[in-house]
Structure formats: structure tokens, C-alpha cells
Image (tube, rainbow, N blue to C red):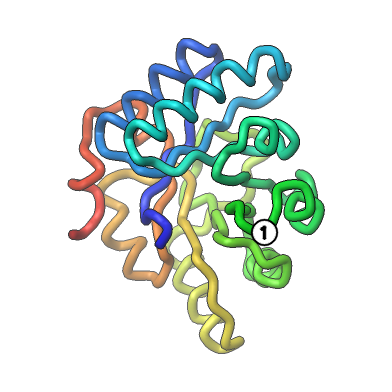
Amino acid sequence: MQNKLQYISQGNTSVEQLKNIQHALENGCKWIQLRWKNVSEKEFMPVAMRVKELCKRHGATFIINDYVEWAKTIDADGIHLGLDDTRIAEARKILGEHKIIGGTANTFQDVLQRIDEQCDYIGLGPFRFTSTKDNLSPVLGLEGYTSISKQLQVAEKQAKIYAIGGIRSEDIPFILETGVYGIAVSGLLTHTNIQVKDLLPQ
């Protein structure tokens, strides 16, 4: 079963990335997505190797954002792809059937596309405005997640959907009530000492 809380890393440098990921792991996170855009393979790979070691030590799943070939080289647990990134079918050919492949969605139609592409999970958002992502799509709010969950029921479709985007700790119980599977956070774990066990219902 996939963990219900994902941490999406922040940091402009290797030092910041590693510090923030270790912080999230020490606070109980069992799912790390290494998101570090616009860097070279030479910069990225040593950090990814270190994150892989840290995740193994903490019993956490290790996902890489965007870089499919690098994920294969480093033997990460999987990959997360945006709507404009590598196609899911191509990533599956590169990584194999046993790796986790997640995909971004912003609308109900995107969710249907990701289901058809056989993503293992879908990151659906944003919940509210967030400064961690450029070219942000329209925010969904609780109403958006509720609406998409209902549309999936009518269409008799199922998917593991993670809410993402500017989520605060007080939002989580209400978001989970909309029918999503889990939560993906970034700043919430980066900038606080909150424990993962205190974020999700036991």
C-alpha cells in the first residue's frame, strides 16, 4: 500500500535539498519525491544517490521528479511526471512494470487521462496558491476535489489521488473527507518540525 503522505523536496542547492529531505525523514515521512529542477546530471546524481541511501535507512519510498533516465540509472523506486513531461507509456518502457509512476493532473479530464495511462497514483492540484511551482494551474479548493471525486464515482473510475498545493496541517482532515487517497506536501514539512503522525488520522 502506498503511503498516504508524500514529501516533495525543496531547495536551490544540493545542501538545501539534502537538509530538507533529511528533516522530512526524521519527522516520520515515508515517501520522498526529489524535485530539483534545472540542474545538470553532474549536480543531480550525487544528491539522488545520497537521498536513496537516506530513504533506505528510514524505510521510505524514493521517487524522482521528471528525470526518467536518471531515475533508471540510480534505480529509484519510481518517477513523477508532469503533464508536459515524458509520456507515461515511454517512462514505463524505460523503467519497467515494477516501478512506481505517478502523474500530475489539474482537471477531471486530466485525471481520466492519467487513469487511461495507468499511472500508479495521481497528484491532483493545486489545492490553493503555492509559490513552489511556476505557471500554476487554477486552484481547486475543497469544492474542486469533491466535484472530481463525485465525477469519478459517476464514471465508475478509481484512482489513488493525492491532493497537492499549498496545503496546511489544518486543511488535511477536510481534504481527506473529499475522497482523495492522500496528501502531498512541501513547505509544510520543510518549514516546521511537525511530525507526520500528527498530520494524518491514525
Q: Disc 1 residue type?
A: Glu
Q: Residue at x 54, y 77 (%)?
A: 158
User: Looking at the picture, how far across and down is residue 58, in whole percent?
Assistant: 32, 35
Q: Which residue is mark 1?
A: 97
Q: Nearer the viewer, residue 152 or 34?
A: 34
User: Looking at the picture, how far across and down is residue 138, in whole percent?
Assistant: 60, 52
Drawn side of residue 166 relative to residue 194, left or right? right
Q: Nearer the viewer, residue 118 or 95?
A: 95
Figure check: 170 above or below 89: above
Q: For the N terminus, give its image quadrant.
A: bottom left
User: Looking at the picture, how far across and down is residue 50, in whole percent?
Assistant: 49, 21
| Image quadrant assignment for residue 61 | top left
Q: Residue at x 50, y 63 (%)?
A: 161
Q: Secondary structure at mark 1?
A: loop
Q: For the C terminus, give its image quadrant.
A: bottom left
Crowd around label 1: few <14 · some 14–19 · many ≥20 (10 Å): few
| Image quadrant assignment for residue 108 | bottom right
Number of numbered markers: 1
Q: Nearer the viewer, residue 66 or 94?
A: 94
Q: Residue at x 36, y 28 (%)?
A: 190
Figure check: 47 above or below 65: above
Drawn side of residue 122 relative to residue 196, left or right? right
Q: Residue at x 25, y 54 (%)?
A: 200
Figure check: 20 above or below 112: above
